[in-house]
Image (cartoon, rainbow, N blue to C red):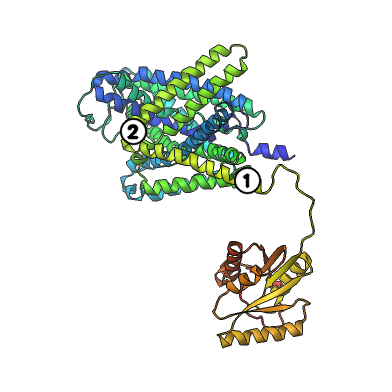
């Protein structure tokens, strides 16, 4: 029953495309443009090479799709490049792969949201001043949808994905049957500066820029556990479908770029020009633009499907805090989602919602992951050597070389534009994960994890209960303390220089004598008005194997009542954990309104809670 309930919140092929491939799908909006902008440096003749460059990218896409289908079968627990590198390339390479994917997922969210908002503000210039707020609003919407479960987010995004794909395919088909452009985009051609000679470097730069269209291809392999059973089969079908759709759209748009002699135009995207040329400046054009805006904004969802699963695997291997392993009721790793949202929001705020500030940082991490994944699969085929392994090894070997070249070219060409930040952040993230792992190993050694410990022994212990007044809260705290052991004492700090404080303690002592709870009350005298120091001094001078400190606190019945709390319990607990070896037990008691004696006027109490 539990398995069927979990399956209800998992993905099928269509849902997997909607939840995990929006990044790759949306890349057709800026991938071809990235190629044209570079080739424009070589003049009109160079722009004519857009199709060959795109075909080369499509070949690489085919290699990646076939490779990741094998990764899905070999690593059904997800992880993609991280899982492959971990098994075949060693610990350090796996951390580089994991760190590169984390960086790419975060940047994908920031870039996708910023790009969607940029497309919106281009259509409605009056919103330009609100870019950051719009970006944060879109981010909050995507986060809220994903917290309801990955299957729920997939259902929400199926329609926008289908509309976008249909719109792009319509542009391609309509353009192929036209003799000439239906309309020409208004605007002046951008000046590319000094025309460069068409050479290998220019083509490599165009290839590297266009490879931005390949980001997100690995997301399905990273999130295999999010699919329904049989998860491997469904994930492989989704990966293949993504590859076919993406290659078709990229090559189709490249054909139209050559057919209509599209050139960069200031303020007008290449996709906008192609929609104009194929469909005219009518309803079809605005459908294409609107669907592009929506899908770019929602492309961040790919990261929400991939990063939480990857973070869970890293946490399972003790490279990230174990909290990333916790799953909510709807099978979502909400701490991974929360981390992704917070870091992406900080990036958007730092970049002021400007897409062009973030784009130079994009795609470097994913190429590092591609290269490590392909190299790891080469080792996989060499070790396993099944039937036809030579062809598969050659395929992955070519892929490793191509993605490595792309990674180097992208990093070098964009280094001064911000790529240096990734070159710094990547090793820092690896160092951080190593530090987390060392901490877990150190804790494991201290706890003798993996070893059978000695038999439990009886220890001498004392239970200390700080009290402020004789009340129902004090009774509840003492009752719990007496259940923990027989040696229970209550303590109260008295400021001897304050007559009011001394008088209050005398009244407390009188109430204690009348109450007779069977627990001695110890006064801790101090010459200054300090809450924690006297109790800490007392505990540090006790000669017991274990000291428990039971701190009773009231849990407010209503949220607004939290402003009435003085936080005494929280301050004391923090100080005890910092300066003593005592075991601190904070007991929060909820006292509902119907528990009060309605015949007696209520007594104001000091509410203490962290």
The tag on residue 546 is none
Q: Residues within 10 Å of mark 1 (few under 14, many from 20)?
A: some
In this orientation, does residue 37 appear?
yes
Q: Secondary structure at mark 1?
A: loop
**Quick one: 1 or 161, which is closer to the camera?**
1
Residue at point 25% right, 32% down? 186
From the image, tell me which residue sits under label 2: 414
Residue 339 in percent (x, y) is at 51, 46
Looking at the image, residue 579 lies above or below residue 79:
below
Q: CA distance from mark 2 to mark 1?
A: 38 Å
Residue 582 in percent (x, y) is at 66, 63
Q: Residues within 10 Å of mark 2 (few under 14, many from 20)?
A: some
Residue 73 in percent (x, y) is at 61, 24
Choose top left, top right, bottom left or bottom right for residue 180: top left
In this orientation, does residue 359 appear?
no
Residue 210 in percent (x, y) is at 38, 26
Callout count: 2
Choose top left, top right, bottom left or bottom right for residue 460: bottom right
Residue at point 76% right, 76% down? 519
Q: Determine whether, in the image, residue 272 is placed left or right of residue 387.
A: left
Q: Determine whether, in the image, residue 415 is placed left or right of residue 377.
A: left
Q: Secondary structure at mark 2?
A: loop
From the image, tell me which residue sits under label 1: 326
């Amino acid at each position: 029953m539990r398995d069927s309930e979990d399956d209800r919140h998992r993905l099928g092929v269509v849902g997997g495309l909607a939840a995990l491939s929006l990044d790759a799908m949306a890349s057709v909006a800026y991938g071809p443009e990235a190629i044209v902008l570079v080739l424009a440096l070589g003049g009109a003749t160079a722009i004519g090479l857009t199709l060959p460059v795109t075909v080369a990218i499509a070949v690489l896409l085919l290699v990646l799709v076939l490779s990741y289908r094998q990764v899905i079968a070999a690593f059904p627990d997800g992880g993609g490049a991280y899982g492959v590198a971990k098994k075949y390339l060693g610990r350090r390479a796996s951390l580089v792969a994991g760190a590169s994917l984390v960086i790419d997922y975060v940047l994908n969210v920031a870039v996708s949201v910023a790009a969607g908002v940029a497309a919106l503000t281009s259509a409605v210039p009056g919103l330009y001043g609100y870019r950051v707020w719009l970006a944060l609003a879109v981010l909050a919407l995507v986060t809220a949808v994903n917290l309801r479960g990955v299957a729920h987010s997939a259902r929400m995004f199926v329609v926008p994905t289908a509309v976008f794909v249909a719109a792009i395919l319509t542009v391609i088909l309509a353009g192929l049957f036209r003799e000439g452009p239906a309309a020409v985009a208004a605007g002046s051609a951008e000046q590319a500066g000094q025309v460069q000679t068409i050479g290998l470097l220019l083509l490599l730069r165009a290839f590297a820029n266009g490879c931005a269209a390949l980001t997100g291809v690995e997301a399905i392999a990273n999130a295999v556990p999010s699919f329904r059973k049989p998860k491997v089969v469904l994930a492989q079908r989704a990966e293949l479908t993504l590859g076919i759709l993406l290659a078709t759209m990229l090559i189709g748009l490249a054909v139209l770029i050559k057919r209509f002699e599209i050139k960069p135009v200031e303020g007008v995207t290449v996709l906008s020009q192609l929609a104009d040329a194929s469909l005219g400046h009518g309803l079809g054009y605005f459908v294409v633009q609107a669907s592009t805006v929506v899908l770019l904004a929602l492309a961040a969802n790919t990261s929400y499907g991939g990063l939480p699963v990857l973070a869970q695997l890293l946490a399972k291997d003790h490279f990230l805090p174990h909290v990333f392993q916790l799953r909510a009721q709807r099978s979502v790793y909400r701490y991974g989602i929360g981390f992704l949202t917070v870091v992406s929001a900080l990036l958007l705020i730092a970049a002021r919602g400007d897409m062009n500030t973030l784009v130079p940082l994009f795609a470097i991490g994913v190429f590092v992951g591609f290269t490590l994944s392909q190299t790891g699969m080469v080792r996989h085929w060499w070790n396993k050597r099944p039937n036809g392994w030579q062809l598969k090894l050659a395929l992955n070997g070519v892929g490793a070389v191509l993605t490595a070249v792309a990674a180097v070219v992208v990093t070098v060409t964009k280094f001064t534009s911000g790529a240096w930040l990734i070159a710094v952040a990547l090793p820092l993230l690896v160092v951080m994960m190593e530090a987390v792992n060392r901490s877990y190993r150190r804790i494991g050694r201290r706890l003798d994890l993996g070893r059978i410990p000695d038999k439990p022994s009886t220890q001498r212990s004392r239970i200390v209960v700080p009290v402020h007044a004789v009340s129902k809260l004090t009774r509840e705290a003492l009752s719990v303390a007496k259940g923990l052991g027989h040696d229970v004492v209550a303590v109260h700090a008295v400021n001897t220089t304050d007559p009011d404080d001394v008088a209050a303690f005398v009244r407390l002592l009188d109430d204690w004598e009348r109450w007779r709870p069977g627990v001695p009350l110890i006064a801790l005298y101090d010459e200054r008005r300090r809450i924690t120091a006297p109790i800490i001094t007392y505990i540090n001078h006790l000669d017991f194997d274990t000291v428990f400190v039971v701190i009773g606190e009231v849990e407010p019945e209503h949220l607004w009542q939290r402003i009435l709390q003085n936080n005494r319990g929280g301050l004391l607990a923090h100080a005890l954990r910092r300066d003593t070896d005592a075991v601190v037990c904070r007991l929060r008691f909820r006292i509902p309104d119907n528990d009060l004696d309605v015949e007696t006027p209520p007594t104001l109490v000091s509410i203490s809670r962290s």
